[in-house]
Image: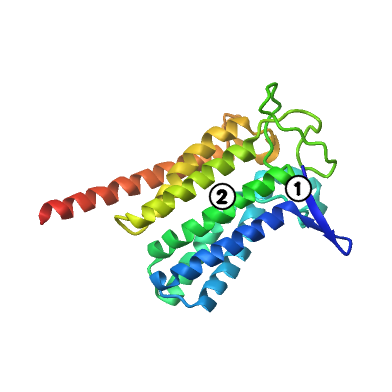
Amino acid sequence: MYPELFHIENHPIYAYGFCIMLGIIAAFIYLNFQKNKINLSINEIGLLLIITIISCIIGGKLFLYIGSWDYYISHKNEMFEWSGKGFVFYGSSFMSIASWWLFAKLKKINLTQLLDVTSIGVAMVHGMGKIGCLLAGCCYGKICNNTFGIIYNNEKSAAFPLYTPLYPVQILDSIIIFFILIILLYVAKHKQFNGQLTLTYMLIYGTGRFFTEYLRGDDDRGFLFNNTLSQGQFISIILVLIALSIYVFKLRNLRKKFESY
């Protein structure tokens, strides 16, 4: 694949970062159209995006270091390497949600309504990020012996091993995320309660991520319970259970209100 898309005066433009940038632009355009729903100006939307980007970097890197602590302890020079790879989505998500909570509190806006609007923007960035993963070779799959495998032959690729068919996990993940995006756009037009889009995202992605984790080959991402579950699978289970519980609770409350009329 192409971890480096092109160069500008000997400075490489990394595929992962470039794809993320495209996702951010798409998210900014969408949020700009939705700004009246959350009572924010275009400058505040820009500020929210900047805060989100910083939060994603901190959270994504922090979870990466925690998940591969033994490796980074012996490779400290790689902890601050910005080679267009090396972020954990769940870490970026948790840190972003924390920053959105603080932002909503300072701006005195409804947090769940803000989360619903940003969920669609997140799906845009997330989906493009997975395409960046595909090009960079990170989040690569296990070795496979069928025609669906993809082969990396670029020495700068993060995938391992090279010149060997690997499961196209990044493609599967991106399909799941863009499917989520379509569902969220539909749900946004028929929303029953604030937070519904966010919960939908958590339910579908958490379920899909749990199964695609079985095909991933980057074993340094961290495992739990004697290697029974990856950290991503464990977090996915927690997210799905939380989202499902809140979703059912919200629907029951809606039913009770409807029956009381």
Q: Is residue 46 above or below residue 232?
A: below
Tag 2: amino acid:
Tyr
Crowding at mark 2 (Cα within 10 Å: few <14, some 14-19, many 20+): some
- Give the residue displayed 48% in from the left and 57% down from the top: 120
Crowding at mark 1 (Cα within 10 Å: few <14, some 14-19, many 20+): some
Q: Which residue is mark 2?
A: 90
Where is residue 1 drawn, in percent x and y? 77, 42
Tag 1: amino acid:
Tyr
- Give the residue displayed 22% in from the left and 52% down from the top: 253
Q: Which residue is mark 1?
A: 72
- Give the residue displayed 83% in from the left and 40% down from the top: 154
Q: Nearer the viewer, residue 24 or 79?
A: 24
Q: Nearer the viewer, residue 184 or 235?
A: 184
In the rendered structure, the answer to whether residue 88 lies left or right of residue 261 reads right
Disc 1, disc 2: CB below 8 Å? Answer: no
- Give the residue displayed 80% in from the left and 33% down from the top: 162
Secondary structure at badge 2 equals helix
Task: State the quadrant of the C terminus.
Answer: bottom left
Where is residue 211 drawn, in percent x and y? 53, 33
Q: Nearer the viewer, mark 1 or mark 2?
A: 2
Where is residue 200 drawn, in percent x and y? 41, 48
